[in-house]
Image (spheres, rainbow, N blue to C red):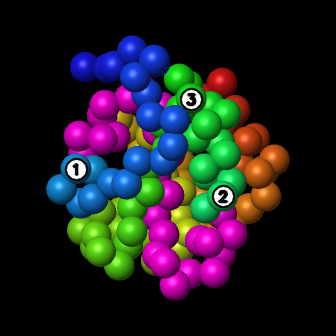
């Protein structure tokens, strides 16, 4: 069951292992940032994710999963390095990227998967 776009979060949603499956099925287009507070590249990517969450409001929902506090999802998705972005469309994983990237590169990925 999908919510109307007016009720979509304008900022990244903090996601936990327990809420992960419900979250990725709640909206048609989702990007989950798997990160940790000690990770330098994660800290570089974080403000870009925040900007994109606002700019793509109503089109794509962004989530943040702290891999230090939540280890089941990273294990299930075989995440070996962070930051890793998981791209979900219709509740299904369609792509992943690893490492920090400039905003234009990430926007190309978003267009590739979400139009």
Instruction: Looking at the picture, tell me which residue is in the foreground, 65 or 89.
Output: 65
Instruction: Looking at the picture, tell me which residue is in the foreground, 2 or 99.
Output: 2
Residue at left offset 59%, top offset 71%: 42
Residue at left offset 27%, top offset 50%: 20
**Rendering coords of residue 55 (x, y %):** 67, 34
Q: Is residue 86 left or right of residue 104?
A: left
Q: Is residue 111 left or right of residue 34?
A: right
Q: Residue 47: which disc?
A: 2
N-terminal-most mark, 2 or 1:
1
Asked if residue 50 is among those painted magenta in the image, a careful observer would answer: no
Image quarter where the N terminus lies is: top left
Residue at left offset 61%, top offset 37%: 54
Residue at left offset 48%, top offset 69%: 35
**Rendering coords of residue 58 (x, y %):** 53, 23
- Viewer can see residue 89: no
**Rendering coords of residue 60 (x, y %):** 53, 32
Write down the residue under mark 3.
57
Q: Is residue 29 left or right of residue 105?
A: left
Instruction: Looking at the picture, tell me which residue is in the foreground, 16 or 11.
Output: 11
The magenta region covers 21-45
Write down the residue under mark 1.
19
Kind of element beneath mark 3: loop
The residues tagged by marks 2 and 3 sit, at their Cα atoms, a distance apart of 15 Å
Residue 4's image quarter? Answer: top left
Q: Callout 1: few (<14), some (14-19), or many (20+) C-alpha neighbours within 10 Å?
A: few
Kind of element beneath mark 2: helix
Evaluate if marks 2 and 3 touch, with contact meaning CB atoms under 8 Å apart.
Answer: no
């Amino acid at each position: 069951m999908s919510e109307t776009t007016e009720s979509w979060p304008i900022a990244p949603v903090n996601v936990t292992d327990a809420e992960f499956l419900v979250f990725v099925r709640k909206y048609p287009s989702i990007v989950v940032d798997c990160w940790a507070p000690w990770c330098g590249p994660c800290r570089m990517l974080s403000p870009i994710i925040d900007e994109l969450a606002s700019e793509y409001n109503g089109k794509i929902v962004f989530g943040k999963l702290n891999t230090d506090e939540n280890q089941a999802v990273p294990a299930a998705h075989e995440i070996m390095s962070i930051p890793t972005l998981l791209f979900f469309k219709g509740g299904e994983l369609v792509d992943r990227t690893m490492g920090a990237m400039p905003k234009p590169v990430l926007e190309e990925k978003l267009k590739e998967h979400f139009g």
